[in-house]
Amino acid sequence: MMGINDLIMNALPLPVLTVGPEHRVVHANAAAESFFEMSLRMMQRQKLSDILPFGSPVMALVEDVRQRGSSVSEHRVDIGSPRLGPERIVDVFATPLGDDSENVIVMLQERTIADKMNRQLTHRGAARSITALGALLAHEIKNPLSGIRGAAQLLEQSADENDRLLTRLICDETDRIVKLVERMELFGEERPVERGPVNVHGVLDHVKRLAQSGFARHIRFVENYDPSLPPVLGSRDQLIQVILNLVKNAAEAIGIDAMDGEITLSTAFRTGVRLQVPGSQERLSLPIELSISDNGPGIPSDLLSDLFDPFVTTKVSGSGLGLALVAKIVGDHGGIIECEPAPRRTTFRILLPMHRANDGREADL
């Protein structure tokens, strides 16, 4: 029968191991079994060095705790391995189990969610930092561009064939700049947006129909939906804009010549993720998860930290505003977005708040 200490250990959401002499695993909680994808009985037959990658600093940390007789912690330790997956970054907290015991308690906290929160705040700041720039461009550039285009059209009327190529070039480039400026204007829109209950599956299905009838007609779509998912609190039009942008990016990453292109649309209900609302002590729960994955070549690692910043792009002719706008809209919804790269697989994951009725009850569609 399970004792009270075992019940407490299994209730903890973080992986916790008890490491005995010779680094043998004495005990592990349920979160550790899930983290290492290994049963307690199997872990008890192994040493810590068998579970973690060769030369992991966690072993040295355990020895340090034994020698000091006090708690030691180390932050941002990479315990990635072929079995655990690449770049599994954790904070490690180790403490002796009693004064005379050789057993050491080791607790791991994966940095994925914490880093996601920090990066999302940075994404929001980067997106909002160009709000004033968008308004300035709209006012100071669009008017003179209109004059330039009008002058080019007048010249075209009396120009010969060769000169018409030049006037047409002026008009085309002017139109291209106007489109860029109009996209910048979107960042300057601070008007309140009416929000209500939105069925995310309706949003995803709408975007999929648009994609399959146009830019992604050569790509296979896979749906992995949670049918019981409650509605999100948001703007349907803006969420369509977000998902359409991400699906279009996925299709462009796969390429028009790909024979096995695949985009996966997923939804899930995740508990336990909360984000503090800026300017208040309120913590907003973000249980609704939307994922868009593609099997394209992936995103260069040197761009990942700046991916949602304005003017950062992997496209030869891209403006780099699409993901910045996505980050702004998701941030305005009180959510977070993160890119999770893997070999031949790129996943954009969005977490959003759930819609609730005025009396606090979950809303039904």
Image (tube, rainbow, N blue to C red):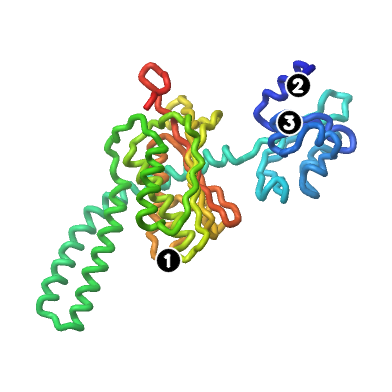
- Name the image quarter holding the C terminus: top left
Q: Is mark 1 on a helix, strand or loop?
A: loop
Task: Look at mark 2 in the image and give the residue it sits on.
Answer: 6
Which residue type carries mark 2?
Answer: Asp
- In the picture provided, is 350 more to the left or to the right than 167? right
Secondary structure of residue under mark 3: strand
Q: Which of marks 1 and 2 is nearer the N terminus?
A: 2
Q: Is residue 313 visible to us here?
A: no
Residue receiving disc 3: 16
Q: Quadrant of the N terminus?
A: top right
Q: Which of 104 and 99 is in front in this view?
A: 104
Whether residue 273 is visible, yes or no, is yes
Mark 2 / mark 3, whichever is N-terminal: 2
Residue 361 in the image, given as x and y percentages of width and height? 42, 19
Q: Name the residue under label 1.
A: 316
The spot of residue 286 in percent (x, y) is 48, 32
